[in-house]
Amino acid sequence: MAAAGAEAAAVAAEEEKRLPEGDPESGGDSEDEGDSDSSGDGEDEEKENEAEIQRLEEQLSINAFDYNCHLDLIKLLRQEGELVKLRRARQKMSELFPLTEEIWLDWLKDEIKMASESSEREKVYELFERAVKDYICPEIWLEYAQYSIGGIGQEGGIEKVRSIFERALTAVGLHVTKGTALWEAYREFENAILETAQPAPGSVPSPEQQQMLCSQLEKIHTLFRRQLGIPLLDMEASYAEYEEWSEDPIPETVIKNYKKALQQLEKCKPYEEALLGAETPKLAEYQAYIDFEMKAGDPARIQLIYERALAENCLVPDLWARYNQYLDRQLRVKELVLSAHDRAVRNCPWTVGLWIRYLLAMERHRVDHGSISEMFEKALNAGFIQATDYVEIWQAYLDYLRRRVDFTQDSSKELEELRSAFARAVEYLKQEVEERFSESGDPSCTIMQNWARVEARLCNNMQKARELWDNIMTKGNAKYANMWLEYYNLERAHGDTQHCRKALHRAVQCTSDYPEHVCEVLLTLERIEGTLEDWDAAVQKTENRLARVNEQRAKAAEKEAALAKQEEEKAEQRKQARAEKKASKKAKKNRIGDKRKADDDDEGEWGQEEEQPSKRHKGDGDGLLLEEHMEVETGLFGRSGPEKPDRPANQKEKASTSRKDIPKVLHDSSKDNVTVFVSNLSYNMADPEVKLKELFESCGEVAEIRPVFSNKGAFRGYCYVEFKEEKSALQALGLDRKVVEGRPMFVSPCVDKNKNPDFKVFRYSTTLEKHKLFISGLPFSCTKEELEDVCKAHGNVKDIRLVTNRAGKPKGLAYVEYENEAQASQAVLKMDGLTVKEHVIKVAISNPPLRKLPDKPEAGRASQFAVPRQVYGARGKGRTQLSMMPRALQRQSNPVAKAENGMVQNSPATSSESPEEPKKMSNADFAKMLLKK
């Protein structure tokens, strides 16, 4: 109650501080009636802010690791002037996350304004000490040093300021672009002390004063010399200032160090300029700078460039991992190493690898057991995004506990703690992890296997090991041969022959994946150590088991063959139905053709040739054919006058010539590097050469555009675009997925698949991306902007990709990329199961399943086309075995025998006018035909 009363009093005091000058309680003038409306608006806004503050506080009580929620709450409280609540909110956030430079500077400035007494100044000092530990920031160190100058009048104030300046120089004095400000501030402070130590004009200084003056001058000289030996921007100005300030000539050694630092600065300038011109996050530029400093080998400079990179990329786990690895292997300074590991896990708590490295570093530097156990408990509450992460952190902690045990003793406190930790780990994975992820993350029970190994090898307790393995086998692992052999090897090394034999007999009975291997191991055991009775029993056991396995496999094969036969019969029925349908259509067309021939032989013949292309996709050229076809029909029914009898024939001759004269597009593979392959274009595209040239001229000079047409002149939706320069072709790849006439245009490198059969063009990652979300169940009407409005509430959205089909129609799927893994994890928790336009969406971390590689055909392309396509029905054998025969020729009623591109057409004897239809062939008939050949 006392604490609550004190807090209420503090809040009341702060409210009094925030009263406006015009408030009646403060003695000011009352508000005018004209201001009543604005006052009402202010009250409404204040109520809205209070409601929002309450909502944010409730949200943080549910999930304390919501980084953006912390930021929003701090911003609102600062806006409202709620200092007590603001201080508490900042404190809670700083306990969970390292704060950025901006947050720390705002907090420090607010506290500095309120600090008037010496006790309050000490609290500000403590706050500065916390701030400089989160990140190495020159601005915070400079603010710290300048604030300490305000306490110079206190006892030991000057030495305290000098101590802070020296620490600041150690931390960021090597910063190429911002270090100069600290050196200059330090010199100004010492110059100010020098001014106060000067004797009064006209007076003679005492020996003590003279000694103090000389000492102070030497300190300033030393600062100049130290600074000039470090590569910093504007070194020339600092050198000129030293020349002007110093009454004595600059020593030769100082000049030599200055020139050496200048040379080093010239080497650093390209990297600094690259950072200056790069856009956030600048990871590539920082990595190049780090590699440069690593080659130079100065630990202080390497540490500083890592810290600079992390200040801008604090949520990149790989960067923290590389930095910590360097500190662990090279510097090995306890305070520095543990501080870096602590900041790493506070920035990226979802990354299990950072926690494991932290535990190892704590053990390496002999941190007490209680602290390590406490850190492990924090790791368990960090909210990992995969079940396997919990298995890894448990295994790391169990390894640590195992290394603490002295196994020469039969019993010890450490051994009991290890056993209880193993038991807790098994229970934790079963309860907590399995409840959250619907899996334990440890299907092969590796933790229980390690526990069994410890009991058998280190504790000589095979009974406990057998109990553990019995438990492992009951969790669905008894069907795997490798699990039984692992247990057998443990029994072989630390058990006895009887239990080995028993384990193998059970393995023979239970194994379903590789029973032959287990049977072989059992027979080998009996051959070496067994009696005749043991051998006979093993032989009988293995023979019976293998006989059952072979019988089961035979039944499975028969079942599969029966299913295949059923599918074959269904396919045959579908083919027959299609053939009958096709025959009926053909008969109907023949009747129409006979009628046309009776009316006008010439027009009838023309109509028969042109009726088939009218079924194809109608581009510009096909529109002409359709127009001609319709004119023939009007002539048949008396709607066209006799004055134009020759127009269809003339147009037919012109259209036919335009199609047949189109040369075949040949691609020169030697120009692959300057050529791109463009596909998924609209068949209706008018003049594709002109259209595509307009699109691709922005990438560079286009040498040639080669659209691909069918032998009837219809555009086939793809083409080759050849550039003058290779860089233009590379730039053209950026137009991939650009929408052209309502369809996404696919642009890919021009690669010969025969020479590079494994080449795949897929621009997106197919591996786990923890900063990217996969969203399914979206309404087809959902736009990119609408989805972004939903997603940006949980973090900074870098990119959104709506998945579409080849025609550009949405599939209800999307990928959303956030700036970091923390925001993505938060978005999964908040958005999974959300309703968008009456559709419940599913949200998960992007982890596409592995793609199945297609089986490579045994025969070449020619073998696919050596058999007439008519054998397989109207649709052929499927999309993976396409015939190269033009469809117009396939549909002719009287095709001419022809061999072209490795295919053989039917002879004239198999004309559709023949009264006998060709016999339908099944897959079995087809196989027999090939075998006879």
Image: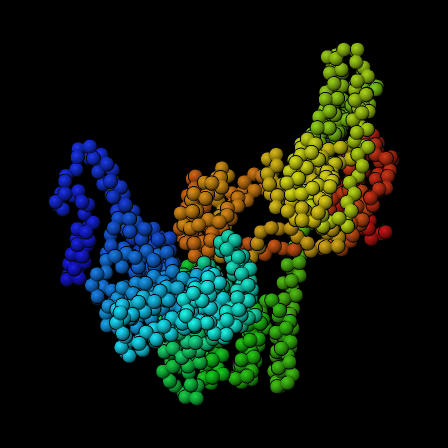
Q: Please say if 28 is above or below 758.
A: above
Q: Please say if 880 is above or below 349.
A: above
Q: State the residue in front, 729 or 644.
A: 729
Return the x and y of residue 153 as percentages of the image width and height.
24, 68
Return the x and y of residue 765 as percentages of the image width and height.
57, 54
Left or right: 720 in relation to 492: right
Left or right: 716 in relation to 86: right
Q: Is residue 145 visible?
A: yes
Instruction: Count numbered badges in the picture.
Output: 0
Image coloring type: rainbow
Return the x and y of residue 316 as percentages of the image width and height.
47, 60
Residue drawn 45% across the image and 58% down it? 312
Left or right: 891 in relation to 762: right
In the current view of this chain or complex, which residue is farthest to the front? 202
Residue drawn 76% across the image and 32% down it? 713
Q: Quadrant of residue 605?
A: top right
Q: State the residue in front, 913 or 416.
A: 416
Residue drawn 54% across the image and 40% down it? 810
Q: Please say if 652 is above or below 282.
A: above
Q: Quadrant of residue 642?
A: top right
Q: Is residue 95 visible?
A: no
Work out which quarter of the rendered image holds the N terminus and state it.
bottom left
Residue drawn 63% across the image and 63% down it? 552
Return the x and y of residue 340 as percentages of the image width and height.
42, 69
